[in-house]
Each structure stands twice: as C-alpha cells, then as structure tokens.
Image: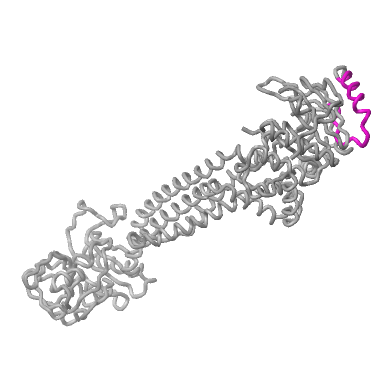
Amino acid sequence: MTAVQPQTGMRDSAGEACPGPVVLEARAVTKTYELDGVEVHALCGVDLQVCGGEMLAIMGPSGSGKSTLMHIVGLLDRPTTGTVTIDGVDVSQMDPNELAAVRNRRIGFVFQSFNLLARTSALANVELPLIYAGVSRSERIRRASEALERVGLQDRIKHMPNQLSGGQQQRAAIARALVTKPSIVLADEPTGNLDSRSGMEVLAFLQELNSQGITIVLVTHDSNVAAHAQRVVEISDGRIVADRRVGQRTVGAGQ
Amino acid sequence: MNLLESFRIALKALNSNKVRSALTMLGVIIGVAAVILLVAIGSGVQQEISGQIEGLGSNLLFVFPGDFSGGGGGGAGGPGTEIRKRFSLDDARTVQRRLGAEAIVVPVVQGPATLRAGNRTLRTTIAGANEEGNQVFNATYVAGRHYNRSEYSAGARVVMLGATPAGELFPGQSSVGREVSINGERFTVVGEMAERGGTLSGDQDNQVYMPTTTAQRLLGSKDLSSIIVKAVDPKRIDLVKVQIQRVLRPRFGDEFTVFTQEQTLGILSSLLGTLTVMLAGIASISLLVGGIGIMNIMLVSVSERTREIGIRKAVGARTHDILSQFVIEAVVLSVTGGIVGIALGWAGSAALQSVVPTEITWWAVTLAFFFSAAVGIFFGVYPAWKASRLNPIDALRYE
C-alpha cells in the first residue's frame, strides 16, 4: 500500500482535473503470473482513472506491465486482485459472457499485430463485432461500410488482410473498433508494426476520434507516440511512476 | 445471435479456409468410402456364394457313401475317408419307395468323358441322373428337352450338353439333334443347357447330362456317386432325412452321410465370416487412417483457430457463440464429407460390380458415417471448446 502512496498523489494532480465522469477505473489492481514455477508480478497495485473524452497514453518500457494493464482494463484479462470499473459499473464479478457483452458494446480494440481474421474480407472483419451485437445483416453491412469509409478504405472493402498494407490493415482494425460506436478505444502499440508515415496516420485517426468524444487509451513505449495524448501515465515494473499532462501535444498529420 | 447467424459465421469460416475444409472432408470421405466399398465387396462375395448354394434349392439332401460325420461335420471327408460300399440303383429305388410322393430321388453318377464331334474333341464330365435330374440340377434349356422316362429306363444314348461342350463342339449352331461320340459311343443330343457360370462345385457348364443307366454302362460301373433327394415340402426336410437314414442303415450301417443344404451353408458361412472379419479389419484401418487425417488437420490449425477465437472474443463473442460456430463447422464438414463418402463408396461398388460381386451393407454405411463424423466433430470442437474457455488475451497470444 505504501508503494501506491506516491503515485496516488501524482494521479490526483492530473486526475483532479477530470471534468466529466470517470469512464474507466482500475483500483488496486495486481496481476501475478506463474512462469515455470516462478511468480512474476506484472502489476503490483495499480490505481488508474480515465476520464470521459480524454486521450491517455500508458507509457513504459517492455515488460513494465503496460500491456497487461490495458488488457485488464479492456476486460481481455482478469486481475489477480483489485477491481475494474467501466462507466461506473464494477465488472470484477461479471461472468465471461457478461464481460463479452461489455467489450462488445463499450470497448473497441486496436492491436499492434492488427488481429484481423485471415482470409476474411475487410468488410467481414469490420462486421464481426456487429454480428455478436445481434445487428441485422443489412444494417451491419451499412455500418461496416460506413466505418471503412471513415478510415479511408471505401475502395478496399472486399480485400483480404494479406492484400492490404500494414497501415491499411490497422485502419481496418480501427474501423472494426469504431463500428459498434464504443465509448472507449484501447490501442495497444497501434503503430508498433507500421512505418512512420502509416503510424502518423493512425495516430491522427485516433486524435480525430478523440476530438469526436471517444475516450482513447494508447499503450506505447515511444514517447513521440505518447506525445499525441493529452495525458501520459508512465509505468515501470508494474507500478505507475508518473502521471502528467502533456503540455505541447503533437497533432497527427491528417489523412 | 440466432442459429441462422451461427450458420452464416460457420459457413463463412469454412469458406475462408477452403484448403483446410477440403482436407478435413477428405479424411471423412476416404474413411467412409473405403469402409463402404470393402464391406460391400466382402458381403457381395458372401451373398454370391451362399446364393449359389441356395440356388440349388434349400430342400435338397445329398446322400454320399462313407461316414463323414466324424470329420468336423465338414463336407470334405478327404482322402482319409475310406468308402467300402457304394450305392446302387436299387438303393435309390428303395429310398424312393419309402419316401413315395414326399420326395424326388435322383441317382447320380459322375465320371470323366471325352466328347468328339467331327474333328473336335473335348474332355468333360458326365453327370448321370434320372428323368427328374433337372429338378435338382436347377438348369435351364437353351434348346431341346430333358430325356424322358422311357429313355432313362432303356438306357438310351441320349445326352444334354452343358454350355461349354455345346459351344466347343458346335460353335455358332444348335447342337440339338446332332450326334456326338462320348467315350467312343454315339449319342444323340436332345437338349442344350444355358450357361450358368462357375460355382463352388466346379464348372457346371462343362458337363454333359445323360440317363444314370446309360452313364453306368458307359463308365462300366454299377455304382452311384451319390443320391440327391429333393423334399417336396421344404419344411419336412428333417423328416425326409430321418427316413433316408432308416432305409439305408440296414445295408450300410454308418457308412453313408446325408448332408442338408443348411449344413453345407453352415460350413461355408463360417469360412465367409472369416473373410468378412478380415475385410472389416481392413475397413477399420481405413477408418483409423481417415480419422487420423481429420485429427491432424484439426490439430494443426489449433493455433490459428485459437487466435481466431481470441479475436472473436475480444470483439464480443460469448462462449456459446464460439462453440456453436465450431460445432456447426465440424458438423457441416463431417456430414458433407460423410455424404460424399457414401456416394463415392456406393458409386465405387456399383462400378466394381462387373469385376467382383458387391453388396452395400447398411451397418457399414452407418458405422463408417458415424465414426468419421464423431472423429470430425470431436477434433473440431474439443480444441475450440478449450480455447473458448481461455481469457481472450491468452487465446490471442496462443502460439
């Protein structure tokens, strides 16, 4: 608990400014893995509040636990101890199917390795979350096409992932994250597999989404990427070590 | 998400992995088709053979000289069985008198013969019987007639030719009314038999049929090879058998044997049963190979599919969404493969019909189908079931 003390102070300095509701909150979250019989503490008591409409970067070197934190707040993984609250609802006690429903409706994911279904068209990939949301077929196609248009892939909707460039694949993945109109988009090293130009484009998209009111959490090890956010949380060895506002925010190069 | 949507997802997934789908189906197809085909051949051969025996008539009794009862009930007494006393025409008459209208008794003589017509010669077998011989030989005529009672009593030199001698000696023409020389004696051909094909009891086409009396004189022996008795009422066959034994016992003691068709069939069916077991063994191996094929494809794609499950879960698929997708995929593949396999096995056995007798057996179809389907569904669903229980992130990161 003592370890948490200093960062609480830091969070407060930035978190005080939360203008609207807290959309995402982690409280005293720990995550312990067992690896070949050795306990690995990926997260050792993390408290984090994400305000509605903000663009937050979680930054840290590899192995710092930043991705683990994102997976836990994104409900892809469960904390060993601690609670996660989304839009004021504690999800710690939810069963896997309820968690799936929350992911489906409230959260969009963008991964470093895109995670598109292979040999499946861009359109079908973007449609996927809507299928599980129970949206009718015609409505799905309409909304998925719209989302692809929004990321500038309107003439690539029938292409398979392997027929798209890395930047295009990531844009398709962003379209998939957007198509359910989530309140939060979690992006795990979204530029990690991209050349710098495509990376810039992706960051510009994320900023644009943020300007439209979507909360963005960006995980990165790159301070230049983190500089696109409004707020940066630094994490090291499973603990939050800094939480600060970005003074000179980098504005992404547009499309 | 409704069932229709699950179907759509599953079919889409199958469609986007055509090679994997095809290979999985191939496993099912090979397993099912191989089993159906092999068992069809086995039971076809079995049917054919027992059909030939039954074709002789299930109400027939074969009376042979010599005691075969000790030899495992077998039809082959073998060279070890010494025959001390043979039947004569009188014995056949005695049996006929005892049985009266209950049965038809045919005294049979068999022996070698050399046929000659013009400059053509043929070695063949004489089958001597009385005027009711056609009742037990189950033959049809192409032309002519059976020799009659008076020809039989008189020991007339009349003969009916089997399909082989008729064709060999009188190619392309009717033999009826022509003359042939048999072992040096001149005979008139009164009938010609239709072709019957080879059977277990030898080439029945390469025979000539003549009155028993004539045959005995020709072969220089008063003995009969056997007596064949046809019971008029098949239900009374056991009674007929007992009566035959009663008549012959005073003169022959135990030195004769009465075989029923049933006994002959029994011996053969145990032989054929072994054949079927062998084929079933081969079939099980094909099923196993097919099953391993299915398993391999499914297991090889586990890591890719686990990641797919991770993606689907990340965007909101619930456990039963994943499971229903994979169950439907596996069922569609297995059932389609099974149907194609059944069609192939059926077509294959139809195509083989000209070479080897085949008979589709429903137990083989059912067994092959359900086994392959079960293997396909198990290996399709089990890894998916395991993956669906993982945290989405563990599924996404699966290596």
**Residue A52 image offset from top left, x and y in percent:** 88, 37
Q: Can residue A10 be found in the magenta stretch?
A: yes
A160 vs A56, left or right, is left
- Residue lying furthest top: A2
Q: Above or below — where is B105 with respect to B379?
A: below
Name the foreground residue: B288 vs B48.
B288
Residue B252 x %, y %: 22, 62
Q: Is residue B105 left or right of residue B359?
A: left
Asked whether residue A129 is in view, the answer is yes
Residue A94 versus residue A3: which sits nearer the camera?
A: A3
On screen, residue A34 above or below B165: above
- Foreground of the two, A44 or A127: A127
| Left or right: where B115 falls relative to A132 | left
Q: Is residue B89 visible?
A: no
Look at 84% across and 39% down and name the residue there. Answer: A211
- The residue located at (76%, 35%) in the rendering is A253
Q: Is residue A54 magenta?
A: no
Query: Which residue is depicted at the point 38% across and 57% down?
Result: B41
Q: How many marks?
A: 0
**Which of the two residues, B381 or A242, is positioned nearer the viewer here?**
A242
Q: Residue at x 66, y 32 (%)?
A: A195
- Is residue B209 placed above or below B399 in the rendered structure? below
Q: Please tell me in which quadrant of the rendered image residue B49 appears.
A: bottom left
Query: How did the renderer colour the structure?
Result: one colour
The quarter in which the C terminus of chain B is drawn is: top right
Residues drawn in magenta: A4-28
Residue A140 x %, y %: 74, 53
Residue B176: image location, x then y, percent: 16, 79
Above or below residue B354? Residue A78 is above
